[in-house]
Amino acid sequence: MSKLCITTISDTVGRTPLVSLSGVDGVSHGVAGEILGKLEYMNPGSSIKDRVAKHIIAQLSAKGISKSAPLVVAGPGNLAISLAMLGRSLTCLLPERTTTDRVRLLKSLGVTDIVRTLDGALPGSPEHACEIGRRIVKHRAGSVYIDEELGDWDLSACYDELAAELIEQTDGALDALVLGVDTGNAATHLSRALKAKLPTIQIIGVEPTNSAIGEQSVDNPLARRWLCEDIGRAYAPRALLPGSIDMWIQVSDRVAYSMARRLVQGGVLAGPSSGASVAAARMYAVSACLQPSSRVAVILGDTARNYTDTLLSDDWMLAHDLLDARMVADLQRTQIEQYRAASIEDLQLPAAVTVSENDSMHYAVALMAEHDFSQVPVTGPSRRLIGYLTLSAAQTLLDNHVALPTDPVRKFMLRFNPAPRNVGSANIRKEYWLITPETPLSELSRFFESHSVAFVTDASRKFCLGIATKQDLISFLARRHTFRF
């Protein structure tokens, strides 16, 4: 077998890249030293927890625990994803703030037993994940409870490997390591391993504003709330050994999420906790007055792809006030100001050419070819718009003899109707969005984020007045000399 072929997924864990973040907007400006990102999200399960899962599985095997033994796993979700990816059956205990993207991924991995736990529950309380997990294990013979926070698993070798990678990739020239703190295992073991080789290195711990892990903790932990996942606790985890962290930096949700978006824009597809760590690295670099030769490494432990409904959603970010002022201004300019209150009427679209649902497929294809159309609206009784037919689909159906030239268009058209797809029929129903000449171009632009063509009708949806595509918007902006695409 070729040396390039790896036989198991677990063999791909680790050896993640270390890259300069100088090309990311807002990271290196005004900083003398170099900030480097350790891309742990490039592990096969897209998080640093792949390393942890690999070592926990090895210890389960060493204890003689069967591979089929059900696991009960507590945490924000990344460890559960990693264990499921490596073939383990498990029940997952997730905090309420864990994103739906992770839940969907866990379900796709075969995890159907997911229990939500209370954010900020204190150890010993019945609502704490540990207490819930122990109750589940008690009633499930042969199951094993896994919770990094309890320190039941020896993760020293796991983080020794990561520390060795950092030293090798920097040739031992590393002045500080910045990482988010949650269970405390990574901070404890990386601090120990790195300081054994680099005695002067500074370990910077990062937590959300209102978290109670570091020295800046405040009273009333049950009142603490933050959105950033994978870092922070309402109490100090027992796995975090005193003295492991040289400096604590708290980062607000807005700073964390805004920096994460800047990382994504710079090609670094890391999540909010990574955004918090990079922002903290910049704060440290500025305050420490680094030399030009200084190097600060940041652990980027999770992927932006786990946050499609949150971090990557402009609407969600705006609704939760998580974009900084410059990002808000850029978004407003992109979504609204470039169109200057223009509507579809300003596109000056030609009048729509339509076919009837009773017209033949041959006629519809000939009409689209004559006018160089990619699609044509289809009308029903009283010439009401009921759907459309695309040229590519019609030609394919005719070429493959699925449709006959004499067949009516209604058999193969795409219908605007919320009803479900008809099993056994080529007729597909599509959700209909009302778009009129008065629809603002800013709304039309958002429509084109998930659709290729817009059929413009009157308010009663009776007549099709025109057809608009993204190209019409581009041409409109070019005419206004404000082209931004």
Image: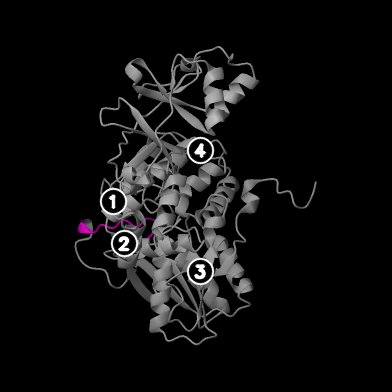
* Mark-to-mark CA distance, 2 and 4: 36 Å
**CB under 8 Å between discs 2 and 4:** no
Mark 4 or 3 closer to N-term? 4
According to the image, label 2 marks what residue?
Answer: 328
According to the image, label 1 marks what residue?
Answer: 119
Q: Give, as a three-letter code, the residue at label 4.
A: Leu
* Mark-to-mark CA distance, 3 and 1: 27 Å
According to the image, label 3 marks what residue?
Answer: 190
Query: For residue 393, which quarter of the picture?
Result: top right
At 40% from the left edge and 82% from the top edge, which residue is drawn?
286
Q: Is residue 252 above or below residue 59?
A: below
Residues in magenta, as a range: 223-233
Residue count near mark 2 (Cα–Cα under 10 Å), binned few <14, some 14–19, many ≥20: some
Q: Is residue 222 above or below residue 28?
A: above
Q: Is residue 383 above or below residue 332?
A: above
Residue 361: % across, % down: 54, 18
Given this view, does label 2 or label 4 mark the residue nearer the observer? 2
Q: Is residue 61 above or below residue 214?
A: above
* Mark-to-mark CA distance, 1 and 4: 24 Å
Q: Give, as a three-letter code, the residue at label 3.
A: Leu
Given this view, does label 1 or label 4 mark the residue nearer the observer? 4
451 and 484: which one is in front? 484
